[in-house]
Image (cartoon, rainbow, N blue to C red):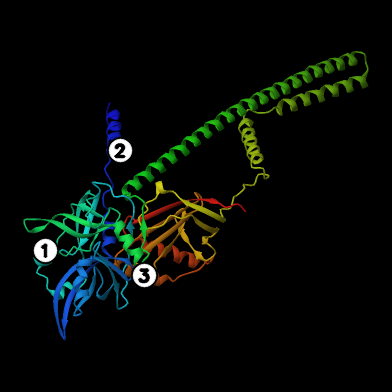
């Protein structure tokens, strides 16, 4: 009864499972790209604070915000734009390079060599009731903290608020998303993101209640943003893949592994039962052969004893007839027959030979089965592979999912140029670029013919730590040197220990060998 109740509860939990919850790592990854857009009036050496809004990077050097945030900078030459990132210790100047008041969007070019990790735009449909997070710099929080202009131009973490989509309540001028994530003055231009950290829209304005901050927010939709960026000549990263939680995929992979193990165990049990049955039949046959052989030996021995008795009787007869020579001959024959009978009896097969004969027969059958004179054939995993992503096993948040060709060589060399290190039952290599805030672990499992890519969208401090670790090991090309292979293995372990438990993105490719 308890078992039935548990199964029923599990079925209900599966049936009524809610949408994927926002992963804090994805929200943190999105926050890396959010900036405060500060406007200040300059008069000689004097600087006066004019106002601020929020924005987000869509390219390493380009920021999207609302048109109304930077409108005064276009009208007043004395007003300058400052871009304050959420992390690090440097702020940058900004210049408006595209302006679209019709849908309240503007594009800012970072100056002073500034670069930020860009976000990915979600171009798929947004479901009513979907969870969303608004990220930005609400002025009400700044005022509550008593921040001054010096504080506002220093990098600080943005504010995140949660809510849900309340419908696509499009305005008369442009396409918007209505949502319940709390926003305030200063959030304008900041991103509205989904649970995987992709841009759904740019917060633009709110519905006021008794003069207070907005109870509902309106965000310029991602469709408007993508169209605006295309017209501005900016190719932003975009995806339409639905968001899936890391926890759901982990549970699915665990269930898949458990099912695969159960299938293998069942196959092994069936094979073992088959072998036991075959061995029992073989043992029965060999036992019958030995019993037959023993009976034949004893029958021949008995016959020889009978013949020896007859020969002995003949020898006695010849003695009575005083035929000495014939008596000696027949007596000798009788003696030989007795000796032969004893030898045949003693050389009959023993029951202890059954186990030895069974083992020898099984070995001969095994040797004949591999078709190689008893030598085990090893199939090499080296070769060219075509790898296709399995979306059901992957968490796709920011990447394209094209087919992936790889060339695998025994010893961990990939594509003839990149050396992977042993990583348990697979081979892995970790990539820590200088120009991006992304740590990538690529792995190939030759036994399963699976290639996986795990991406961690980490903060600046974690990225700096990963680069410091990488610099200790260097960047090695394909090699068979054991010290180099050990260094790669140690580097993967060292950097992985600094990363979050779950990657922001995990792509699983299933590979097949290409035809020669």
Q: How many marks?
A: 3
Vertical relation: 184 (above or below) 374: below
- Separation of disc 2 and disc 1 at Cα? 41 Å
> In the rendered image, which residue does mark 1 sit on?
140
- Separation of disc 2 and disc 3 at Cα? 42 Å
Mark 3 vs mark 1, foreground winner is 1
Residue shown at 54%/64% (left/top)? 416
Q: Nearer the viewer, residue 422 or 52?
A: 52
Mark 3 and 1 residues: CB-CB less than 8 Å, in contact? no
Mark 2 vs mark 1, foreground winner is 1
> In the rendered image, which residue does mark 2 sit on?
14
Q: Position of residue 379 (x, y in %)?
A: 59, 50
Q: Earlier in the sequence, mark 3 or mark 1?
A: 1
Q: Earlier in the sequence, mark 2 or mark 1?
A: 2
Q: Position of residue 356 (x, y in %)?
A: 63, 34
Q: Is residue 246 left or right of residue 354?
A: left
How many C-alpha atoms fall within 10 Å of the one at disc 1: few (<14), some, or many (≥20)? some
> In the rendered image, which residue does mark 3 sit on?
467
Q: Nearer the viewer, residue 310 or 217?
A: 217
Q: Position of residue 475 (x, y in %)?
A: 45, 70
How many C-alpha atoms fall within 10 Å of the one at disc 2: few (<14), some, or many (≥20)? few
Question: Can you see residue 199?
Answer: no
Residue shown at 65%/23% (left/top)? 288
How many C-alpha atoms fall within 10 Å of the one at disc 3: few (<14), some, or many (≥20)? some
Helix or strand or loop: what does disc 1 sit on? helix
Quadrant for the N terminus, please: top left
Q: Which mark is residue 379?
A: none
Vertical relation: 233 (above or below) 129: below
């Amino acid at each position: 009864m308890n078992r039935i109740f548990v199964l029923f509860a599990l079925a209900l939990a599966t049936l009524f499972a809610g949408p994927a919850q926002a992963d804090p790592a994805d929200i943190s990854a999105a926050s890396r790209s959010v900036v405060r857009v500060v406007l200040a009036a300059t008069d000689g050496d004097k600087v006066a604070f004019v106002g601020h809004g929020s924005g987000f990077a869509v390219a390493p050097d380009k920021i999207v915000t609302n048109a109304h945030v930077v409108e005064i900078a276009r009208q007043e030459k004395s007003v300058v734009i400052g871009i304050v990132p959420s992390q690090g210790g440097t702020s940058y100047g900004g210049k408006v390079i595209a302006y679209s008041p019709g849908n309240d969007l503007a594009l800012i070019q970072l100056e002073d060599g500034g670069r930020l990790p860009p976000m990915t735009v979600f171009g798929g449909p947004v479901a009513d009731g979907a969870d969303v997070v608004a990220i930005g710099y609400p002025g009400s929080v700044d005022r509550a903290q008593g921040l001054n202009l010096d504080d506002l131009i220093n990098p600080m973490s943005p504010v995140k608020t949660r809510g849900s989509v309340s419908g696509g309540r499009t305005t008369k001028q442009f396409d918007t998303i209505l949502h319940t994530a709390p926003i305030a003055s200063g959030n304008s231009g900041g991103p509205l993101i989904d649970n995987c950290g992709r841009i759904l829209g740019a917060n633009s304005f709110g519905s006021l209640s008794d003069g207070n901050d907005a109870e509902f927010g309106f965000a310029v939709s991602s469709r408007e943003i993508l169209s605006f960026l295309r017209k501005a000549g900016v190719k932003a990263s975009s995806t339409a893949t639905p968001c899936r939680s890391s926890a759901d995929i982990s549970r699915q992979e665990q269930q898949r592994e458990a099912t695969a193990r159960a299938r293998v165990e069942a196959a092994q049990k069936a094979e073992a039962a088959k072998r036991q049955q075959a061995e029992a039949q073989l043992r029965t046959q060999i036992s019958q052969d030995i019993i037959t052989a023993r009976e034949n030996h004893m029958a021949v021995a008995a016959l020889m004893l009978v013949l020896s008795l007859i020969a002995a009787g003949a020898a006695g007869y010849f003695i009575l007839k005083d035929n000495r020579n014939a008596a000696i001959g027949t007596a000798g024959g009788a003696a030989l027959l007795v000796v032969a009978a004893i030898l045949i009896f003693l050389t009959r097969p023993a029951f202890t030979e059954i186990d030895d004969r069974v083992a020898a027969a099984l070995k001969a059958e095994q040797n004949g089965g591999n078709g190689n004179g008893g030598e085990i054939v090893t199939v090499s995993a080296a070769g060219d592979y075509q790898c296709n992503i399995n979306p059901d096993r992957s968490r796709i948040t920011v990447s394209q999912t094209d087919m992936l060709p790889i060339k695998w060589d025994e010893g961990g060399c990939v594509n003839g140029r990149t050396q992977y290190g042993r990583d348990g039952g697979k081979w892995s290599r970790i990539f820590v670029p200088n120009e991006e805030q992304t740590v990538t672990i690529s792995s190939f499992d030759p036994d399963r013919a699976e290639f996986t890519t795990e991406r961690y969208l980490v903060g600046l401090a974690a990225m700096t730590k990963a680069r410091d670790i990488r610099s200790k090991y260097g960047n090695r090309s394909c090699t068979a040197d054991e010290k180099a292979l050990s260094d790669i293995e140690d580097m993967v372990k060292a950097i992985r220990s600094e990363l979050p438990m779950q990657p922001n993105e995990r792509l699983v490719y299933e590979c097949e060998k290409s035809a020669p």
